[in-house]
Image (spheres, rainbow, N blue to C red):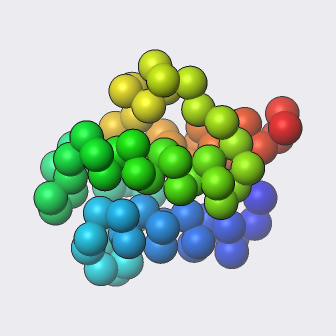
Amino acid sequence: MTHDDEEAFVALAARVLGIPVAEVTVCTDLDSAGRWTSLQRLQLMAQVEDTFQVKFAPREMLTIRTVTELWDLTRRKRITF
């Protein structure tokens, strides 16, 4: 995956979180970011699945806490895709 993929990923996270892209980094804690809800978590995971052509298990959706964790998981799944 490329740097452009990473930027698209962060922009996607910011859009779902409803906060400016400048406020999202790969270290952003999803549980404390803005108005983060369980619905937003599901929306983000679903959009990442669609955008990056990966599939997450339900338990994976519950364990992700940072943008880094979600990005790393997405990259690992893309490699094995």
In the rendered structure, the answer to whether residue 11 lies left or right of residue 74 reads: left
Viewer can see residue 34? yes
Q: Depth check: 64 or 3 in front? A: 64
Residue pictured at 31% horizontal, 51% vertical: 40
From the top left corner, tell me how far across and down residue 74 is, in percent: 63, 44
From the top left corner, tell me how far across and down residue 14 is, in percent: 37, 69
In the rendered structure, the answer to whether residue 58 lies left or right of residue 41 reads: right
From the top left corner, tell me how far across and down residue 33 is, in percent: 21, 57
Quarter in which the N terminus is drawn: bottom right
Q: Depth check: 42 or 33 in front? A: 42
What is the count of numbered marks? 0
Viewer can see residue 66? no
Image height of 8 relative to 46, above or below: below
From the top left corner, tell me how far across and down residue 9 is, in percent: 55, 64
In the rendered structure, the answer to whether residue 48 lies left or right of residue 19 reads: right
In the rendered structure, the answer to whether residue 3 lies left or right of residue 79 reads: left
Image height of 21 relative to 81, above or below: below
Residue pictured at 59% horizontal, 32% vertical: 56
Residue pictured at 44% horizontal, 52% vertical: 44
Quarter in which the C terminus is drawn: top right
Image height of 10 relative to 44, above or below: below
Residue pictured at 39% horizontal, 43% vertical: 42
Image height of 14 relative to 69, above or below: below
